[in-house]
Amino acid sequence: MSTDDSAAHPRFAEALRALGLTVPVRRFPDATRTAAEAAAAIGCDAGEIVKSLIFTADGVPVLVLMDGASRVDVERVREELGADRVGRADADLVRRTTGYAIGGVPPFGHVTRTRVLADRRLLDHPVVWAAAGTPHAVFPLDTASLIKYAGGTVVDVRERSE
């Protein structure tokens, strides 16, 4: 595991510099594509992992930031956006929208601007870990700053527990 910012995807490293952010980026030899893999590698709870997920709302990409222990409720996203249809984006649309592959999408530093919804449960954790542009690299940031830099609106879009 390395901890220098050269471990981040070059585009994401540039986004960090542009924002004036200095964060430790950890690179792992094995991919951390899922929240469970990332939590195990970091040694934290899955809820402290940020999933950056691209959906489409009436054909328009939207980024949903969700804690790693929860699932997105597509119906709640639809209601939040006032959309007729919401669904998961395919891998090609994720890459075109963000510039990154699924499993390595960071919460900001994308090639296009999209609307960002941040689930309120992220705020349960003072610091969260997110992908740094590759499935092998993650970085920590205080949750409020992460949502601010992502341009997120705090909403309730996680699946409700039965």
Image (cartoon, grey):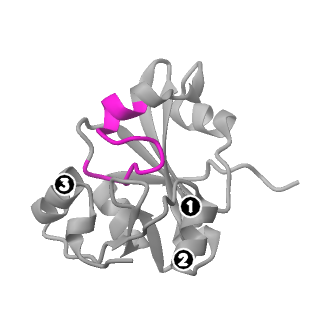
Q: Amino acid at mark 3?
A: Pro
The amino acid on which the numbered mark 2 sits, given as a three-letter code, is His
Q: Position of residue 77 (x, y in %)?
A: 59, 37
Of residues 111 and 148, which is closer to you in this image?
A: 111
How many badges with numbers are in the image?
3
Specify start and end residues of the magenta stretch as a single range: 94-109
Query: Could you tell me which secondary element the residue under label 1 belongs to?
Result: helix
Which percent across, then down, holds residue 102? 46, 42
In this view of the protein, which residue sits in the foreground, 56 or 23?
23
Q: Is residue 68 visible?
A: no
Q: Is residue 13 shown above or below 159? A: below
Q: Is residue 61 left or right of residue 114?
A: right
Dot in front, 3 or 1:
3
Quarter of the figure that contains the C terminus: bottom right
Determine the CA span between mark 3 and mark 1.
30 Å
Q: Which residue in the protein does label 3 denote? A: 10
Q: Quadrant of residue 29?
A: bottom left
Q: What secondary structure is the stretch in magenta mostly built from? A: loop
Residue 87 seen in the current view? yes
Q: Name the residue rendered at 19%, 60% in the picture.
A: 13
Residue reaching furthest front? 29
In this picture, is 105 found above or below 96? Answer: below
**Residue 103 placed where, x, y %?**
48, 49
Residue, disc 2:
125
Q: Return the residue nearer the eye: 49 or 146.
A: 49
Determine the secondary structure under disc 3. Answer: helix
Residue on which the image places disc 1? 120
Label 3 crowd bin: few (<14), some (14–19), many (20+), radius 10 Å: some
